[in-house]
Amino acid sequence: MLIGDITHYLESRYPLSLQESYDNCGLTYGHKTHEVQGILFALDVTEGIVREAISKKCNLIISHHPVVFRGLKQINGSNMTERVLELCIKNDIALYAIHTNLDNHKEGVNKRIADKIGLSDLKILKPKKDTLVKLCVFVPEEAETELSDALYNAGAGSVGNYSECNFTTEGKGSFKPNINAKPKTGELHKKNELAEIKAEYLVPLAHLNQVLNAMHANHPYEEVAHDIIPLHNIQQDMGSGMIGSLKKPIASKKFLKHLKSTFNTGVIKHTALVKDEIKTVAICGGSGSFLIESARRKRADIYITSDLKYHEFFDAENSMLVCDIGHFESEKYTISLFAEILSKKLPNFAVLLSKTKTNPLNYYS
């Protein structure tokens, strides 16, 4: 198993195109052609994590948070990032980060938080825009079904909870092949006409290349007439945060106790208990102040996130309860998610969860 095999699989599930512009997901250090000896999963990468990887003979560390967020002008051990990179280079340990592309995925960090809390009827809190295109393909009537099946398998035609979606229009196509053409049907140097179907499909940008490859591989024409149209539609199943419902309402204080116990946090910072009961719950793992307004508009009873500043607690306008449970605590179950993802792909390959504590915060009580 090569490092490139691992990264290709992860990126087929959680495309790098889903990451935010400020982020640095993917292979930070290492070579895709190197063989994997062992994989260590971690939330953060510290010197302790690298030493743990060395002791466990792992030459690939997969973390949620990237080691390098900004450009480096030197590596001389002056800070933790530089020392981590030095250790990895000296011991030939590759670093791979799967961060906001996992945060923005419907089966990512927030889904894991929702499962731990016990939420159902889940939806993305703030779906992403400008991540979809409409693909229009002109194809002979008799080839439309086979082509559509190939495009569906490549990632086209999904809308929310529905798959294999398209819209077709009957029409007449015309073409005049020149001397260098090799048409499947029709005569050279003559205008030919035949019945065609215009088939339209919704395609996420992350899957566009593979969909186009499938189109060219399964279309009967030498030259495939097609249009790619950018859309401003939201992508319902990708984006920031998540919102869902408890099976039945829970008293606010009781829910806070449940939250504290589930995420084993030393303290929960929260606004006034403006709701007697909690039913609708909005969540965002990690830093989520940017979603307070989205949670308020969706009429959440409570919004759970971390890294909130003093003045940001006011943004709820007393319309819902806002909780800060801690950054590490909100994402602590992410590494077990990594293990589940890869164990399905590599059932006979050992994947190890880091035992090294990386949370920089402690709570005094």
Image (tube, rainbow, N blue to C red):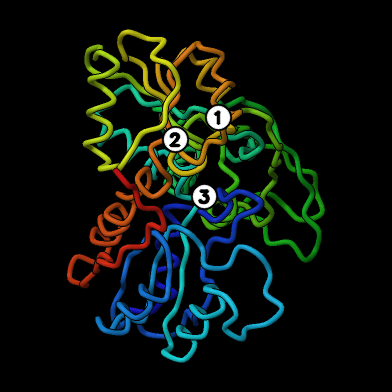
Do callouts 2 and 3 mark residues in contact (Cβ within 8 Å)?
Answer: no
Q: Quadrant of the C terminus?
A: top left
Residue 137 in which image quadrant: top right
Instruction: Answer with mark 1 or mark 2, whichever residue precedes in sequence.
Output: 1
Q: As drawn, is 78 to the left or to the right of 244? A: right
Q: Residue at x 80, y 64 (%)?
A: 179
Q: Choose between 306 and 238: the one closer to the eye.
A: 306
Q: Residue at x 68, y 30 (%)?
A: 232
**Residue 269 horizontal/vertical position (percent):** 41, 31
- Which label number is shown at residue 305? 2
Specify few, some or many for label 3: CA neighbours under 10 Å numbering under 14, 14-19, or 20 or more. Answer: many
Do callouts 1 and 2 mark residues in contact (Cβ within 8 Å)?
Answer: yes
Q: Residue furthest left?
A: 348
* Gap in angstroms between the C-alphas marked 1 and 2: 9 Å
* Gap in angstroms between the C-alphas marked 1 and 3: 15 Å
Q: What residue is pinned by disc 1?
A: 291
Up-down relation of residue 252 to residue 66 (above or below): above
Q: What residue is pinned by disc 3?
A: 100
Q: Amino acid at mark 3?
A: Thr
Q: Quadrant of the N terminus?
A: bottom left
Specify few, some or many for label 2: CA neighbours under 10 Å numbering under 14, 14-19, or 20 or more. Answer: many
Q: Residue at x 44, y 74 (%)?
A: 4
Element type where label 3 sits in the image: helix
Residue 323 in which image quadrant: top left
